[in-house]
């Protein structure tokens, strides 16, 4: 029974660390010594003992990774709503996005990266936008618009 649950877990787990833990325990149950397991898997004796104890206490659940990630501050529907709002606008800025999220959902992100991720999800460059080109020079543009056959005061 123990071996079967370990084998199923090894075959179905997508996490390398979980698989390594399960293999170490399985090898121990098959009669391998700590020294042999250490040399084959490149793990310490403490690693083997720790995961053997976890397996016998909780079964394969004890071999799984404990960290599951954090819950997002915006749920899926709220995030989608914000992304659609961003897509509907012609101009964007970070302060406006911060205000929109705070006023609608009462959420203020600790890191600006969360706002940048929303811009990216909406396929928008989050860099500051400008209403006009600061390098625009009307005289230079006008001089380039002159006909080619007119140069200076001479006409051909």
Image (cartoon, rainbow, N blue to C red):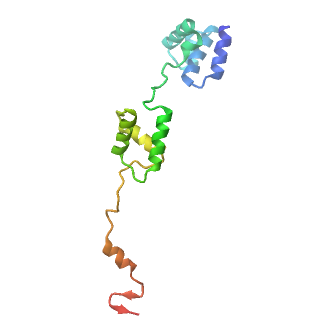
Residue 68 drawn at (x, y percent): 49, 23
Q: Is residue 41 left or right of residue 99?
A: right
Q: Is residue 15 left or right of residue 107?
A: right
Answer above or below: position of 104 versus 143. above
Residue 65 drawn at (x, y percent): 52, 20
Q: In the rendered image, which quarter is residue 111 located in? A: top left
- Work out whether residue 61 or residue 91 is closer to the camera in this orientation and state it: 91
Residue beneath the point at 47% across and 35% down = 78
Q: How many marks?
A: 0
Residue beneath the point at 56% across and 20% down = 18
Q: If the image is split into quadrants, where does the N terminus sit?
A: top right
- Work out whether residue 45 or residue 142 is closer to the camera in this orientation and state it: 142
Answer above or below: position of 50 versus 106. above
Residue beneath the point at 31% across and 75% down = 139
Q: If the image is split into quadrants, where does the C terminus sit?
A: bottom left
Residue 144 drawn at (x, y percent): 38, 77
Q: In the rendered image, which quarter is residue 85 located in? A: top left
Residue 90 drawn at (x, y percent): 42, 54
Residue farthest to the front?
A: 104
- Work out whether residue 40 or residue 84 is closer to the camera in this orientation and state it: 84
Q: Is residue 144 left or right of residue 37?
A: left
Answer above or below: position of 30 versus 142. above
Answer above or below: position of 125 versus 75. below
């Amino acid at each position: 029974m123990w071996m079967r649950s370990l084998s199923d877990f090894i075959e179905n787990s997508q996490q390398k660390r979980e698989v390594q833990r399960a293999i170490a325990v399985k090898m121990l149950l098959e009669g391998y010594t700590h020294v042999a397991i250490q040399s084959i898997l490149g793990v310490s004796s403490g690693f083997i003992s720790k995961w053997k104890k976890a397996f016998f206490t909780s079964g394969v659940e004890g071999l799984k990774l404990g960290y599951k990630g954090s819950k997002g501050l915006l749920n899926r529907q709220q995030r989608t709503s914000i992304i659609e709002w961003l897509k509907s606008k012609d101009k964007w800025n970070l302060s406006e996005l911060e205000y929109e999220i705070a006023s609608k959902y009462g959420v203020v992100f600790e890191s600006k990266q969360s706002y940048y991720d929303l811009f990216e999800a909406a396929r928008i460059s989050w860099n500051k936008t400008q209403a006009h080109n600061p390098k625009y020079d009307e005289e230079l543009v006008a001089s380039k618009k002159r006909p080619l056959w007119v140069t200076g005061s001479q006409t051909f």
